[in-house]
Image: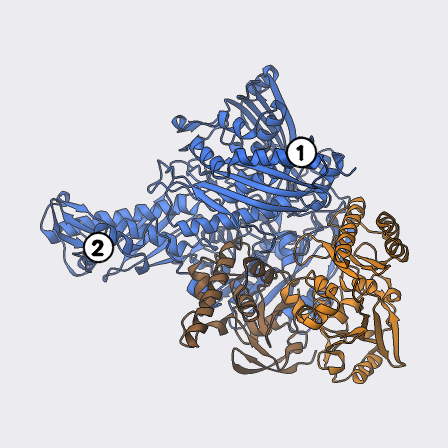
Chain colours: A brown, B orange, C blue
C-alpha cells in the first residue's frame, strides 16, 4: 500500500512523515514521532488511554487514521507540561491528590480533563464524572481523579483571577 | 488490532465524493467520524480498498434552525448537537438523546449522518429520527432524493441508501409548543448500546413512538403512536411490544428485553406527558 | 532550624517515613507521559510478532499452510509447533505442575489458542501475514461445563491419556486434574448430622479476568555476539521468569537478563509465562534481532489468565442460637484446557482453605476437584492472594444463607461467631495460624459508622412502601467481614516451581548520606518507590526523598519472587526493614567509634545515634555515612550497605469490615451504590494516602466483578465478552465515592507490623456488593443467586419472586 505524506502540528511543533493511510494516529505518534505518552488500552474506543486533543476536541487516537487528521493541530499529555519543564496544573493536581497508580491511563485522563476544563471551568462532581466517562482507570476507582480535576479547576480559576 | 490497507480520499465536494464511489463501486466506502467503522476495520470485520473521508465537504456541515423545521448536515457531530442552544430549544429531545450516546470523545467525532446511515440497530439516532418523522436527503449519480426515516431501514446494516449515494442532510419538523418530548435509555454503562431505548413525542392530540435496539431495525409503530395520541398508554405499550422483535445477547434474554422495553416506553411516555403540560 | 534545634518529632516528619502520606515519586514521570512501559521500548532493527489463533474451542489442527504469509514482503518467519518441537519448546511447563502447548501441537483446546507465530518487520505486516496463514481444522465436541466434562467420554488432554497420577495426586477421570482435601471429613460430617440447623447452598464465583489497562507483552533481544538474551516484559515476577526461561530454553541463567519496566497494572494477569514470551525469545534467537510481542485486548481477554470459575457447594452447621459448629465445602474448579493456575506448588487450590473466614469454626472440611474444559487456562489470583477471594465470597455468602435459615440478623450472626481478640494466634480448623486480629472492635466501629440500625429501619419502611405500591426500588444492605491471608510465604511450605517464596532487599548508603535500595519485587502501580523508601527512612533516619528505589532488573536487583498476592509489603517490606536494621547496626558501631564511647553507650534517636544521657553528643546518619567511606575504623570494613533475604515465619492476616448500601430497581434490574464504607485493618500503615488509593481501586474492581464483569462462553466455546463493550469495566459515572476507615492491629511477626492491603478491597468488596443485592430481596424470599449481578440477572431474581405482577 502506498504511503502518503503526513503533516501535523504536535505539541506546537510542525512534524512531517510518510505513513500508510491505514496507520492509526496512535501508532504514528508512538512509533514515528516517539511520543509515547498516549497509550493503547482497549483498541475499540472504550478506554480512552489513547486520548489526545485535536483541534480543540478530545479524540481517541487509536480509533483515528492519521490520514483523517492530516493538517491538524494535536496536543498530547507531553504538551501539557509547563514551558519551564515543571508540571502543569492538572499534572500537579493528579500527583497531589493521588489520582494515578500504574500511570497507564493517566496521559489520556489528563489530556481529556484538559479539554473538559477548557469547556467547563467550574464543573460539578457530576459533570466531571460524566465528562470523564470516556476514560477507564483500573487502579484508582476514580475518586481521587475527580478530586484532582476539581482541584485543578479551582487552581486554574485562581490563576486566571490573579492574572486579571 | 490492525486494519487492512486502503487508499484514502478526501474529496472537497459531494460530486467528487460520488465520483469516487462510482469509480470504485463495492470497493469504496465513506467515512464520517469513523467511530463505528474503524473498530470494525480493526477487527477486520470490514475491509475496503478505498475510504472516502467526508470531512472536507462544507455542504455536509451546519445546523439550521428554521421556523418549521431543523436541518442537520450529515457531518454534524453529536457534540455539536449537544452544544447548539438553538437546536436544544427547538427540539430538546435531540440533546437528550445525544447525551446518551457513547462517551465524550466519541461524541466529538461521531456524526449524526454516520449514526443514521450506518444501519446499526444499536445506534440511537435512527429511532429518534423515526420518532421525529425526519427526512434524509440522499445524493447520488442520479441526483437527489428524499427518504423518510420511517422508510429508510430495511434490516441490520441494510438501508434504502444505494452504494453510490451519500446521506447529505436531515430535515426534522419542529414538534412545536404543547408537544412533550422524552428519550429513555437503559444501558449497562456509559459507552454501551441500549438494552432498550424509547423516543416519545406526545401532545396536541398527536403522538409518535419509536424504540431502539429491539429489532434488526429501529421500530416506529403507527399503532403505538395512534394509541398514545388517543391517550391509551397501555394500548400504546402493547402495540409496541407486538412490533419489536429483540434477540438475546449479553444484555439479556428476550423476555427481559421485552419487559425493559415496556418499562422504558412507559417512563418516556410519562415524562413526555409531564413536559407536554 | 537546624539539626540541633529541631525536636525529635520535627526531625521524624522531615524524613517522610512510615505513617506519612508522602506524595508519590513515580508521578512526576507518569503525569507527563514519560513512563517507560514495554510497548514504549524501541530497539534498532526490532521485529514484531503476532499470533494466528484458533477460532474453535476444540479442534484438530489438520494442516498449517504458511506459503502465502511467507510470500508477503516484510515477513521474516512463521513458526508452528513443528518448528519449535526440535528445540523442545512446543510445550512449556505451567506453574501448577501441568504443561501447556506453546503453539498448537495437533489440536487446540480453547478459542484463541496460539496456533502459529508470525514475525515481520512491523506490526502492520505481521497482522496482515497472520490473516494469510491458512489453517485447516477438524472440529471436535466442545466441553464448557466442568460437571459435564467429568462425565464425558470426550478426552480433552490426549497427551495425558492413561496417566492416572497427576501433579497433585490421583486423577479420577480423563478430564479430572486433581483432588485437594483439607480438614477432617468424618468429623465434619458427623457435626453436620447432629447439628440443630444446617444450611446448604451452591455458591458460584464466575469466571472473570484481571484485565489491566496495559495488556501483556515483551521484547526479546538476543545479542549473538555476547550470547546474552535481554527480555523486557510485563512480568510481575521477573526473577522467576529468568529462571523459567533458563530452564526451558537451555540458556545459562547468567546469560539472561530480565527487565520489567513500568507495568500498566497487573492484578495477577502478569504472573504467568505465556506463549508470546517463548515465541518471541525463539524468534529473537533465530533471527538475531529484537522481537516485540504485545497482545491486543481481545487476545488478552481470550487467552492470558482468567480468574475464579469456582463452583462451591457448601454446608454450614449451627446451634439454634446461631453458634456455628461446622463447615463443609466441595469445590468444582474449572481450569480450562491446561492447568496453569498461579499457586504455590503445594496448594493446587491456592489458599481456598482460608474459607472458614473470620469465624471460630471448630470443625471443617474442604475438597477441591480441578477439571479440564475447553476454556482458556489461567486461574490467577486477580487482585487476591491465591483463591482467597473465592474463599471469602463463599463463607460470606454461607453466613448470609445461615442467617436466613435461622431468621437472624446477619450482623449479629457474624458477631457471635467471630474469633475473639484473645484467641490470637488462632489455629483454624483448615490448618492456618491467624497472626492477629480484633474483629469485634472493627465490626462495631463499622456498624456504628453507617448507623446500621437506622439503615435497617429505613429498609423496613422501604419494604412497607414497596408492598403498598409507593415505590419500585428496594434497599439492600450488604455486610462483609473478611479475613485475608497474604504474604506468601514461608519457604517451608510455599514455593513456585521449587523457588521458595522469600523476598529480598539490598540497600547501599552513599557517602553523602543518600541511598539506593533494590528489591526482588516489582511495582505495577502500588507505589513501591515511594513506600519502601519510607520504611528505610524510618529505620535508618535518612529522608525518603534521598532514597532511590529500583526493581525489576534481574542483573542488578537481588532475587525475589515478585509482586502478587499482596506479598510485597509482608515479605519484601520485611526484607527492607531487616536490611535497614543491618545498616543501622553497623552505623551504631561507627557512631560509637566517632563519639569515642562503647557501642552499647549510644542509642538511636530518629536520625542519629546519641550518647546515652548526653543527647547533645551525637552523630547523624548522614555523618555516619560519610565516615563509613572516609575513615579507617578498626574492626569494620569500609562502606555501608546490606542485603536481606527474608523468609517470613508466617503469613499475615489483614481483615476488614465493609458495608454497601444499594438501591435496586426491580423493574429494570438497574442498581446504584448509595453508600460504601470500607474499614481495613492492614496492621501498621506505611502511607495512608496510598492505602486509601488501594482501597478505592480494589473496591472498584470488586464492583465490576460483582455487578457485571465476566468471561462468558457460549455452548460452542466462543468467548462472548471479548471487548470492553461487553467486558464490564465501570467508568467514573457508574462508580460511587467510598468512605474509608481503619483500625490498626499490627502483625506480631512482621518486623514493622505491616500486613499488606492491596487485595483486601477486592476480597471484601465482592461479597459486600453481592450481599447487598441478596439482602434487598431477602424479605421477598431470595436465598442465593449467582453473580455477576448485571441488570438482567437482578431482573430475573425479581421476576422469579413474582415481583413483576
Mark 2 closeness class: few <14, some 14–19, many ≥20 residues within 10 Å: many
Front disc: 1 or 2: 1
Q: Assign the C terminus of chain C to one quadrant of the image.
A: top right
Instruction: Work out whether residue B68 or residue C659 is closer to the camera in this orientation and state it.
Output: B68
Q: Residue at x 76, y 34 (%)?
A: C802
- Percent from the top left, x then y, of residue B86? 70, 72
- State the image coordinates of residue B221 (x, y, percent, origin top left): 88, 57
Locate the N terminus of chain C and report the quarter of the image it occupies: bottom left
Describe the element under mark 2 as helix, strand or loop: helix
Disc on the earlier residue, 1 or 2: 1
Mark 1–mark 2 CB contact (< 8 Å): no
Residue identifier under label 1: C464
- The residue singled out by tag 2 in the image is C621
Q: Is residue C675 left or right of residue B4?
A: left
- Give the farthest residue toward the top: C194
The chain letter for the residue carrying disc 2 is: C
In the rendered image, the residue lying farthest to the left is C596
Amino acid at each position: 500500500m502506498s504511503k502518503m505524506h503526513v503533516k501535523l502540528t504536535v505539541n506546537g511543533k510542525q512534524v512531517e512523515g510518510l505513513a500508510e493511510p491505514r496507520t492509526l494516529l496512535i501508532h504514528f505518534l508512538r512509533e514515528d514521532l516517539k511520543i509515547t505518552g498516549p497509550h493503547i488500552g482497549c483498541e475499540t474506543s472504550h478506554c480512552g488511554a489513547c486520548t489526545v486533543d485535536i483541534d480543540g476536541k478530545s479524540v481517541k487516537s487509536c480509533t483515528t487514521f492519521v490520514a483523517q487528521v492530516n493538517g491538524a493541530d494535536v496536543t498530547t499529555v507531553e504538551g501539557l507540561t509547563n514551558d519551564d519543564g515543571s508540571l502543569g496544573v492538572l499534572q500537579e493536581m493528579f500527583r497531589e491528590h493521588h489520582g494515578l497508580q500504574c500511570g497507564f491511563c493517566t496521559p489520556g485522563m489528563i489530556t481529556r480533563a484538559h479539554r473538559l476544563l477548557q469547556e467547563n471551568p467550574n464543573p460539578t462532581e457530576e459533570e466531571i464524572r460524566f465528562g470523564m466517562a470516556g476514560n477507564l482507570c483500573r487502579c484508582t476507582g476514580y475518586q481521587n481523579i475527580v478530586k484532582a480535576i476539581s482541584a485543578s479547576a479551582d487552581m486554574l480559576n485562581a490563576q486566571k483571577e490573579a492574572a486579571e | 488490532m490492525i486494519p487492512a490497507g486502503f487508499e484514502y480520499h478526501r474529496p472537497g465536494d459531494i460530486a467528487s465524493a460520488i465520483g469516487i464511489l462510482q469509480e470504485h463501486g463495492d470497493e469504496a466506502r465513506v467515512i464520517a467520524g469513523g467511530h463505528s467503522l474503524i473498530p470494525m476495520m480493526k477487527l477486520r470485520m470490514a475491509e475496503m480498498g478505498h475510504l472516502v473521508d467526508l470531512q472536507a465537504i462544507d455542504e455536509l456541515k451546519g445546523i439550521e434552525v428554521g421556523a418549521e423545521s431543523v436541518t442537520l448536515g450529515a457531518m454534524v457531530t453529536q457534540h455539536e448537537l449537544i452544544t447548539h442552544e438553538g437546536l436544544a430549544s427547538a427540539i430538546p429531545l435531540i440533546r437528550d438523546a445525544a447525551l446518551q450516546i457513547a462517551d465524550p470523545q466519541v461524541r466529538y467525532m461521531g456524526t449524526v449522518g454516520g449514526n443514521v446511515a450506518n444501519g446499526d440497530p444499536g445506534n440511537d439516532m435512527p429511532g429518534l429520527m423515526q420518532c421525529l418523522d425526519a427526512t434524509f436527503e440522499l445524493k447520488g449519480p442520479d441526483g437527489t432524493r428524499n427518504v423518510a426515516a420511517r422508510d429508510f431501514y430495511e434490516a441490520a446494516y441494510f438501508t434504502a441508501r444505494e452504494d453510490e449515494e451519500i446521506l447529505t442532510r436531515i430535515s426534522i419538523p419542529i414538534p412545536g409548543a404543547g408537544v412533550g418530548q422524552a428519550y429513555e435509555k437503559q444501558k449497562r454503562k456509559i459507552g454501551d448500546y441500549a438494552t432498550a431505548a424509547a423516543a416519545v413525542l406526545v401532545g396536541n392530540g398527536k403522538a409518535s413512538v419509536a424504540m431502539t435496539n429491539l429489532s434488526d431495525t429501529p421500530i416506529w409503530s403507527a399503532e403505538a403512536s395512534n394509541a398514545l395520541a388517543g391517550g391509551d398508554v397501555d394500548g400504546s405499550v402493547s402495540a409496541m411490544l407486538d412490533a419489536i422483535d429483540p434477540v438475546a445477547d449479553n444484555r439479556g434474554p428476550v423476555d427481559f428485553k421485552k419487559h425493559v422495553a415496556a418499562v422504558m416506553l412507559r417512563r418516556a411516555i410519562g415524562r413526555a406527558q409531564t413536559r407536554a403540560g | 532550624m537546624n539539626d540541633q534545634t529541631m525536636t525529635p518529632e520535627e526531625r521524624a516528619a522531615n524524613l517522610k517515613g512510615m505513617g506519612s502520606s508522602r506524595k508519590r515519586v513515580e508521578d512526576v514521570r507518569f503525569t507527563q507521559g514519560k513512563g517507560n512501559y514495554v510497548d514504549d521500548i524501541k530497539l534498532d532493527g526490532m521485529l514484531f510478532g503476532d499470533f494466528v489463533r484458533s477460532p474453535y474451542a476444540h479442534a484438530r489442527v489438520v494442516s498449517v499452510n504458511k506459503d502465502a504469509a511467507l510470500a508477503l514482503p516484510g515477513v521474516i518467519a512463521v513458526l508452528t509447533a513443528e518448528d519449535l518441537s526440535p528445540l523442545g519448546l512446543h510445550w512449556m511447563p505451567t506453574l501448577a505442575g501441568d504443561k501447556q502447548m506453546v503453539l498448537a501441537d495437533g489440536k487446540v483446546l480453547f478459542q484463541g489458542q496460539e496456533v502459529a507465530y508470525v514475525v515481520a518487520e512491523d506490526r502492520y505486516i505481521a497482522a496482515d501475514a497472520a490473516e494469510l496463514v491458512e489453517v485447516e481444522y477438524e472440529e471436535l465436541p466442545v466441553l464448557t461445563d466442568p460437571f459435564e466434562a467429568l462425565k464425558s467420554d470426550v478426552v480433552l488432554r490426549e497427551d495425558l491419556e492413561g496417566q492416572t497420577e497427576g501433579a497433585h495426586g490421583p486423577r479420577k477421570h480423563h478430564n479430572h486434574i486433581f483432588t485437594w482435601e483439607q480438614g477432617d471429613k468424618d468429623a465434619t460430617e458427623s457435626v453436620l448430622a447432629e447439628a440443630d440447623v444446617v444450611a446448604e447452598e451452591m455458591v458460584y464465583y464466575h469466571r472473570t479476568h484481571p484485565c489491566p489497562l496495559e495488556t501483556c507483552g515483551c521484547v526479546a533481544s538476543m545479542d549473538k555476539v555476547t550470547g546474552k538474551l535481554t527480555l523486557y516484559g510485563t512480568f510481575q515476577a521477573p526473577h522467576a521468569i529468568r529462571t523459567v526461561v533458563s530452564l526451558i530454553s537451555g540458556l545459562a541463567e547468567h546469560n539472561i537478563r530480565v527487565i520489567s519496566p513500568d507495568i500498566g497494572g497487573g492484578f495477577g494477569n502478569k504472573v504467568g509465562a505465556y506463549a508470546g514470551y517463548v515465541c518471541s525469545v525463539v524468534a529473537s534467537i533465530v533471527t538475531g534481532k529484537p522481537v516485540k510481542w504485545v497482545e491486543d485486548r481481545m487476545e488478552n481477554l481470550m487467552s492470558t489468565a482468567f480468574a475464579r470459575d469456582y463452583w462451591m457447594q457448601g454446608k454450614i452447621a449451627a446451634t439454634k442460637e446461631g453458634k456455628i459448629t461446622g463447615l463443609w465445602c466441595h469445590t468444582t474448579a474449572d481450569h480450562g484446557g491446561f492447568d496453569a493456575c498461579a499457586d504455590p506448588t503445594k496448594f493446587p487450590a491456592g489458599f481456598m482453605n482460608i474459607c472458614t473466614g473470620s469465624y471460630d469454626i471448630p470443625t471443617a472440611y474442604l475438597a477441591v476437584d480441578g477439571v479440564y474444559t475447553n476454556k482458556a487456562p489461567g486461574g490467577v489470583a486477580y487482585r487476591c492472594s491465591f483463591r482467597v477471594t473465592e474463599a471469602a465470597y463463599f463463607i460470606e455468602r454461607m453466613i448470609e444463607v445461615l442467617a436466613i435459615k435461622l431468621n437472624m440478623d446477619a450482623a449479629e450472626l457474624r458477631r457471635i461467631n467471630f474469633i475473639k481478640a484473645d484467641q490470637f494466634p488462632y489455629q483454624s480448623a483448615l490448618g492456618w495460624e491467624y497472626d492477629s486480629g480484633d474483629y469485634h472492635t472493627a465490626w462495631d466501629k463499622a456498624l456504628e459508622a453507617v448507623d446500621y440500625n437506622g439503615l435497617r429501619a429505613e429498609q423496613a419502611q422501604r419494604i412497607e412502601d414497596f408492598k403498598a405500591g409507593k415505590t419500585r426500588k428496594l434497599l439492600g444492605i450488604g455486610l462483609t467481614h473478611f479475613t485475608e491471608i497474604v504474604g506468601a510465604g514461608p519457604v517451608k511450605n510455599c514455593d513456585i516451581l521449587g523457588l521458595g517464596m522469600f523476598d529480598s532487599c539490598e540497600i547501599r548508603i552513599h557517602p553523602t548520606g543518600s541511598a539506593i535500595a533494590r528489591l526482588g519485587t516489582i511495582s505495577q502501580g502500588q507505589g513501591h518507590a515511594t513506600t519502601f523508601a519510607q520504611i528505610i527512612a524510618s529505620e535508618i533516619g535518612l529522608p525518603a526523598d534521598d532514597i532511590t528505589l529500583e526493581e525489576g532488573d534481574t542483573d542488578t536487583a537481588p532475587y525475589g519472587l515478585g509482586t502478587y498476592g499482596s506479598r510485597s509489603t509482608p515479605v519484601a517490606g520485611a526484607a527492607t526493614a531487616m536490611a535497614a536494621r543491618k545498616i543501622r547496626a553497623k552505623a551504631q558501631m561507627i557512631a560509637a567509634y566517632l563519639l569515642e564511647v562503647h557501642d552499647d553507650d549510644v542509642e538511636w534517636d530518629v536520625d542519629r545515634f546519641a550518647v546515652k544521657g548526653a543527647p547533645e553528643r551525637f552523630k547523624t546518619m548522614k555523618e555516619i555515612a560519610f565516615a563509613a567511606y572516609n575513615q579507617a575504623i578498626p574492626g569494620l570494613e569500609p562502606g555501608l550497605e546490606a542485603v536481606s533475604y527474608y523468609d517470613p515465619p508466617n503469613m499475615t492476616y489483614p481483615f476488614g469490615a465493609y458495608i454497601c448500601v444499594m438501591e435496586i430497581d426491580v423493574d429494570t434490574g438497574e442498581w446504584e451504590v448509595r453508600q460504601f464504607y470500607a474499614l481495613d485493618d492492614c496492621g501498621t500503615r506505611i502511607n495512608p494516602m496510598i492505602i486509601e488509593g488501594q482501597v478505592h481501586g480494589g473496591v472498584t474492581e470488586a464492583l465490576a466483578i460483582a455487578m457485571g464483569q465476566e468471561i462468558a462462553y457460549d455452548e460452542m466455546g466462543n468467548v462472548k465478552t471479548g471487548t470492553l463493550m461487553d467486558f464490564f469495566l465501570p467508568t467514573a459515572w457508574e462508580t460511587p465515592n467510598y468512605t474509608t476507615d481503619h483500625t490498626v492491629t499490627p502483625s506480631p511477626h512482621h518486623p514493622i507490623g505491616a500486613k499488606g492491603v492491596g487485595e483486601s478491597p477486592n476480597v471484601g468488596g465482592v461479597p459486600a456488593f453481592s450481599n447487598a443485592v441478596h439482602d434487598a430481596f431477602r424479605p421477598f424470599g431470595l436465598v442465593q443467586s449467582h453473580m455477576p449481578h448485571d441488570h438482567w440477572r437482578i431482573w430475573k431474581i425479581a421476576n422469579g419472586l413474582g415481583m413483576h405482577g
